Image: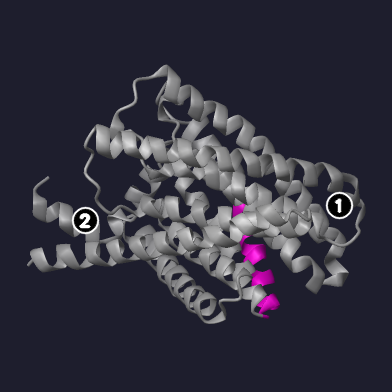
């Protein structure tokens, strides 16, 4: 393929990444983190960007389904890209939480309903189509960091349900069940998918190009598990919540410690990729897979510190939001520049 067709495909919906909803996830969670710091204007502005991006991406994916269905089906059947579709679920839930935080709880509930339904469908469809139904064997060769978006999607449902629960007293029992169920499923999924990804790293030679930003989702999945756990701990009394409150509180602390441990390892992997092996640093949609974990780690610290009365953890989260905001600014600027460059070069 010559340079011009590559540029045209990149600018069309045919080459749209299934994981591009990570843009909404990252922007939304940084907005929520800024709200936790009482940076009201910044929080609202970022939430507006997330909302516009969400609507635009829904439209672009609908266009891709109508005009380039073969490309979308190919992504769905490929175990290397299929799990990226779960970013729609997580983006919808993050947007629901952000909107609910500004008073629009009915819209948040509608978004939760959409996300929960899609999560339930994709949770069976993607493993069945891309993993069990795929022709590639051994399937472990296709495992990568994007598989952990499945975990993020599950925990995002728990976060949204726990956040909206106080606003709908009549549905409190149902919300409690949804929150605890999706949190538990996400926890088990992390244990399973992390094993697959780890085996891929140790069983096969890893090309530096393959160690892409998607592996940061390993930390983001842990961090959102902490946020979901902290939100469940804060929920009002309900049989399902009361049965697991102590367990969830303890596991949330353990998971926060693990997320903290993962950060230097992931930074080291980036140094190995870009400085040791000289992989060029060019913008790609999966850059948002770094911003989202950074923002989620900040929010996790603030939520966990408040829920479990850990002022040190809360303080770390409050400081870390600066890192997340800086990463968002760099990535957003790189994205805009990447859009402008090809348009200037193409006729």
Q: Left or right: where does residue 34 sit relative to residue 117?
A: left
Q: Is residue 231 magenta?
A: no
Q: Which residues are magenta?
A: 103-122
Residue density around tag 1, few if under 14, some if 14–19, many if 20 or more, within 10 Å: many
Query: In the displayed structure, does residue 294 sit left or right of residue 168?
Result: left
Q: Are marks 2 and 1 in contact (CB under 8 Å)?
A: no
Is 122 or 303 nearer to us in this picture?
303
339 and 170: which is toward the camera: 339
x, y percentage for residue 154? 64, 49
**Disc count in the image?**
2
Circle number at residue 19 = none
Place of residue 315 in the rendered image (x, y in percent of width and height, measured from the top left):
63, 58
**Quadrant where the C terminus lies?**
bottom left
Quadrant, the N terminus? top left
The residue to which callout 2 is attached is 9
Q: Nearer the viewer, residue 331 or 271?
A: 271
Which label's residue is closer to the chain start, 2 or 1? 2
Snapshot quadrant of residue 189: top right
Q: Main secondary structure of the magenta part?
A: helix
**Above/below status of 319 relative to 202:** below
């Amino acid at each position: 393929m010559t340079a011009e067709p590559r540029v045209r495909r990149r600018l069309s919906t045919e080459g749209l990444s299934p994981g591009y909803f990570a843009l909404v996830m990252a922007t939304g969670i940084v907005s929520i983190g800024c709200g936790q710091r009482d940076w009201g204007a910044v929080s609202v502005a970022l939430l507006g960007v997330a909302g516009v991006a969400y609507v635009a991406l829904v439209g672009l994916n609908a266009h891709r389904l109508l005009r380039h269905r073969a490309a979308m089906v190919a992504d769905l059947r490929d175990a290397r890209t299929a799990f990226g579709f779960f970013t729609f679920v997580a983006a919808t839930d993050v947007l629901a939480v952000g909107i609910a935080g500004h008073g629009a709880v009915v819209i948040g509930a509608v978004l939760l309903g959409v996300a929960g339904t899609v999560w339930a469908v994709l949770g069976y469809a993607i493993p069945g189509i891309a993993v069990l139904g795929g022709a590639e064997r051994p399937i472990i060769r296709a495992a990568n960091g994007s598989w952990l978006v499945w975990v993020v999607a599950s925990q995002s449902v728990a976060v949204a349900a726990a956040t909206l629960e106080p606003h709908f007293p009549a549905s409190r029992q149902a919300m409690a069940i949804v929150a605890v169920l999706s949190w538990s499923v996400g926890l088990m999924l992390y244990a399973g998918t992390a094993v697959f990804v780890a085996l891929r790293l140790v069983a096969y030679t890893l090309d530096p190009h393959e160690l892409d930003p998607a592996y940061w989702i390993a930390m983001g999945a842990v961090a959102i598990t902490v946020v979901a756990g902290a939100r469940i701990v804060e929920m009002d009394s309900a049989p399902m919540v009361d049965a697991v409150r102590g367990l969830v509180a303890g596991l949330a602390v353990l998971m926060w410690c693990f997320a903290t441990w993962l950060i230097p390892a992931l930074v080291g992997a980036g140094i190995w990729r870009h400085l040791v092996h000289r992989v060029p640093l060019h913008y790609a949609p999966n850059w948002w897979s770094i911003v989202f974990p950074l923002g989620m780690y900040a929010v996790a610290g603030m939520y966990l510190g408040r829920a479990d009365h850990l002022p040190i953890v809360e303080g770390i989260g409050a400081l870390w939001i600066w890192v997340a905001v800086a990463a968002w600014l760099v990535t957003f600027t790189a994205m805009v520049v990447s859009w402008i460059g090809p348009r200037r070069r193409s006729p």
